[in-house]
Amino acid sequence: MGLVSKILQLISFIGVLILFAMVVAAAVAAAQAKPGCSTHKCGDVEIPFPFGLSKDCYLNEDNQSFNITCDGSDPKTGNLIVKNISIEAHEMHVLKNVAQDCYLKSGALTPESTGNSYLDVAPFTISKTRNQFTVVGCDTFAFFRWYQNGENYSTGCASECSSLRNAFNGSCSGVGCCKAQFPDGLQNIKMQVYSFNNHTGIWNFNPCGYAFVVEKGTFNFSTNYLKNLPPKMLPMVLDWAIGNETCEQAKKKPNFACRNKNSICHDPETRSGYQCKCEPGYLGNPYHPDGCEDIDECNDPIRTQNCSTAKGCVNTPGGYTCRCPKWYHGNGTKDHGGCEADFVIINRIAIGAGVGFISLLVLSSWVYFILKKRKILKLREKFLQQNGGMILEQQLSRQEGSTETVKIFTVDELQKATKNYDESRIIGRGGFGTVYKGFLADDKIVAIKKSKIEDENQIEQFINEVVVLSQINHRHVVKLLGCCLETQVPLLVYEFVPNGTLFKHIHQESNASTFPWETRLRIAAETAEAIWYLHSVASIPIIHRDVKSTNILLDDDFTAKVSDFGTSRLVPRDQTQLATVVQGTLGYLDPEYLQTNQLTEKSDVYSFGVVLVELLTGKEALSFARTMEQRSLAMYFISSIKEERLFEILENHIAA
């Protein structure tokens, strides 16, 4: 029902607007012609007073005639066809002939050539802002001449082109078409169009040149017009005013045109004479004795929006007022105090209702938040089970002392630390998650990894990373500080390593040049020490399974720390190898592991060897930008040694 009600309200609103527009249109039409003159149309064109079609039906002010002749269906002023007369804008839209200069293939002028075109629009003036002088042709120059204040002036432009290669439809920038501006207040002009070479040599695509004054936005240049300009008459806009005097001068005369009691006189800025306009709040023809009629603003729903109620609108001459409903007082508007209740009892009822509503709102909000909190707690418990919380607890409980170093963080703690996982806090993305920089309540900086868990197999990888890292306490291995399982996506909290990855420092040119051999050698030794610790010292040996330069982080002193144990495996001491599904990164994968699926410590050693080659060469482990023989860095390095070309692939500052 609510939607139907809104649709009915919208239809009613549109109906009121249409009715208001019809009333206004009827008032304007009724005030078109001078009293006693019944005819005010020629064809489809309205002829409003001070213009007229017959004697005594138009204004004749100081030899300034507003007579319009009606020849069939076309009204004319002089030799111009009138298409529209605007009282409000004081403009007349007319059609004007085009001046043309056409030639035969031999170079002789054709009979239809006009060359010169004279235009006398007095008592009107050519609108500078609404028109432009335009020339079309590829062997054409044209002038726009006028006489003003006792002196001769001219302006114009030229267009030459030997082909249509650089002439484009819609572009009048000098190739096939050019434009020129002219001043305000012109009444008599002469257009002259000429040819440089009688259009010889280009006659096949441009036999004529054209010049004309045209209303801006109505002429769109086409390259087809160079061969033939079909519209021989184009629109132009004229400005008009009454007489040559100012308002102050004209008011003293008995034939002052602004006689309507609701009209005001206005001095135009760009021409002499004066113009009449309806006062604010009135609409119609200010030159007609009964032309300016009061607008009933209360029929306009946009205006009545200012009133406290639509029924409170009261129309007044030239405006409207707002009044308050019964039992209220004030100015009736929505602003400036509005309407206030007259009786204390109404205020008391309103206060009581308000207090009751607020109490109900507070109570319902309290119930809502309690239910929402319970729902959140249940959801967090569900996520804890879903993310393997029980399994993780069992795994950690088997490791002596592991639960003392791993902290369980709450959702709220990590949301606050990362500004609710804001994009600006992202410091890395990997195959198994996104890493955010976080600030704990004690101002400690941490790295928070949000894992991408899309199936239960990945839950096992997440639990695996927690279990593996809980076994490790080594200065060259990223330390796990804790985890959070209360969210749909589990979270791991690590120590923050500020200097980025080894990959970044090797392969980014801005870093590689300031990354000396001594530092590279130390990082290699520290990484080797960490891998040796994982394989030989940890209580249960650990195979990292994804050793690569992006998983080696550097702190402020460029100390190496191995990270990302999502795919690592614990290896019982009575086993030397594990049968697993192959996982790792192409370019670093041990070929033997790739073929046999048998994971051993040698797989990490092979991957570490690729990292060493990266440190020596500065090249990526796998690059499809290199040739097939050079695509794998490991194979490329081995072949270079065999062919005694090792120094060719070492980084320049290392080889030196």
Image (cartoon, rainbow, N blue to C red):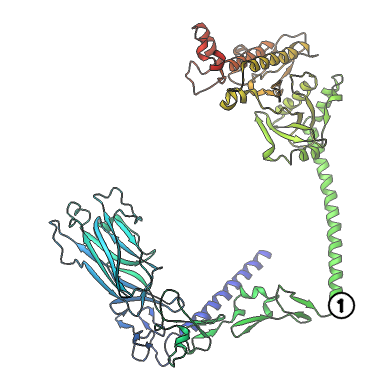
Residue 510 on image: x %, y %: 58, 27
Position of 37 relative to 162 (above/below): below
Q: Which residue is drawn at 37% across and 64% down?
A: 218
Q: Is residue 25 left or right of residue 115?
A: right
Secondary element at tag 1: helix
Residue 480 on image: x %, y %: 78, 25
Q: In this view, does 629 lie to the left or right of 545?
A: left
Using the rendered view, name the quadrant where residue 222 is placed. Answer: bottom left
Residue 410 on image: x %, y %: 82, 36
**Residue under label 1:** 345
Position of 223 relative to 452 (above/below): below
**Label 1 crowding class (10 Å Cα cut-off): few <14, some 14-19, many 20+?**
few
* Depth check, front residue: 296 or 474: 474
* Depth check, front residue: 432 or 551: 551
Q: Which residue is drawn at 72% across and 74% down?
A: 336
The answer to whether one can see residue 69 in this image is yes
Using the rendered view, name the quadrant where residue 614 is placed. Answer: top right
Q: In this view, does 564 lie to the left or right of 82?
A: right
Residue 144 on image: x %, y %: 29, 67
Numbered disc total:
1
The answer to whether one can see residue 73 in this image is no
Using the rendered view, name the quadrant where residue 32 is placed. Answer: bottom left
Q: Residue at x 61, y 21 (%)?
A: 515
Q: Which amino acid does label 1 sit on?
A: Ile
The C terminus, quarter of image: top right
Name of the residue lying farthest toward the front? 150
Q: Which residue is drawn at 84% across and 74% down?
A: 347
The N terminus, quarter of image: bottom right
